Image (cartoon, rainbow, N blue to C red):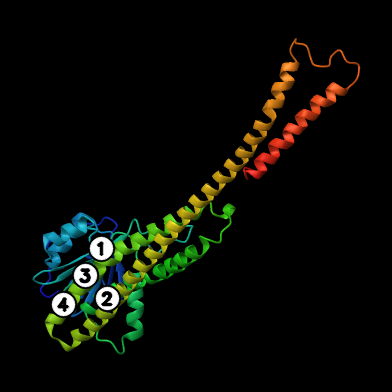
Amino acid sequence: MKGFSIHEAEPNSGCQVTYFSPNTGSIKASTLASLTAEKLGVKELLNLDLYWIDFLNPSYSELKWIGKVFHIHPLTIEDIQGAESREKYESFRNYYFVSLQTFSPNGYSEDGYTNLDHPISVYNIVMKHCILTFHFAPIRHTEKVLTRYSHLKDYLVLSPDWINYALMDSVVDDFIPIAENLELEADSIDELVFILKESEQADMLRRIGKARKSLSGLLGILKPKAEVVKTVIKRIDALKSEAKSDIKLYLGDVQDHILTMIQSAGHFETILSRAHSNYLAQISIEITQGSNAMNDVLGKLSILATVLVPMSLITGIWGMNVPVPGESSTGLGWFFGIVGFMVFGLIVSICYFVKAKVI
């Protein structure tokens, strides 16, 4: 930075600083004030024509110190210090500020879903000759951008706007595999809803719920990105520079990726919603069928009871201390006659219920 001077020492609270310039390459230090490279001190490094400084986990005192050094507006420092989660674009006199959300590279759970409930915010401050990035958890996008630059440096005109674009592109690209996995999961659920056996359906509702939750988190992070990229494109377009026009095209490609994923996610949500409704309807049908089968069994038992109760009444009466017909007879005629009458009544009752289509 031209005319840079340090009036006070930078606090040291474990912040990790990564400095990059085409002249010096990548340099790591614990504080901004401790940056050195090839006999170049921090003043000389910040006076180079182009550089990028990435800050991991800066403290509030360090942010205030950085704000004084680079003339950053207090509102921007407040957003970074407060870990502002809203993705946005803001333009200031000497820079523009971009806030994006990504996720941890180790954010995959055991069931294969990405933990999007706790996104990581990345803050980019893009100036004329430099770009500053801030985040409070490790991300892999800085290494990806540096690797990309090393492959393209012979054909690329490096600028802070390009670094900002490359970071945004890297962030968006990380969501593409998530969208593809959700597409496979949605199609799989849609096919399995009707073909799973009853014993295999126990976890289907939980599986649908997890997929819809992950899809909702994906949409919640992607939708603000489209507006942020659109606003950055407008700013680049207003500069009317040939070098900036390429950045505009690159950002347009990023915007296309975001819109495509949003449209696809909306389609996946429709599929999962339909699968959810079909699954609940199938469960309702199975419950109704089970209830009907139970009612059928109970009906048959009721019919059997209706047939047997008169017989029980007859035998119960004769079991009391009352005279039994034919008790004085020495033969078994009365016994077989009574038993035959009961059997005849049983056959008549069964024939009646069969004819009435009750059984």
Where disc 2 sits, the SS reads helix
In which quadrant will I find the C terminus? top right
**Taking 190 as reference, is 130 above or below it?**
below
- For the residues labelled 2 and 3, the Cα–Cα distance comes to 9 Å
What is the total number of numbered labels drawn onto the structure image? 4
Quadrant in the picture for residue 149: bottom left
Is disc 2 in contact with disc 4, using a CB cutoff of under 8 Å? no
What amino acid type should be assigned to the residue bearing mark 1? Answer: Thr
- For the residues labelled 2 and 4, the Cα–Cα distance comes to 12 Å
Q: Which mark is first along the chain, 4 or 1?
A: 1
User: Pointer 1: what residue?
Assistant: 31
Is residue 39 something that shows in the picture? no
Percent from the top left, x then y, of residue 94? 10, 72
Label 2: few (<14), some or many (≥20) within 10 Å? Answer: many
Q: Which mark is first along the chain, 2 or 1?
A: 1
Residue 234, disc: 4
Q: Which mark is first along the chain, 4 or 3?
A: 3
User: Pointer 2: what residue?
Assistant: 255
From the viewer's perspective, is 352 left or right of 234?
right
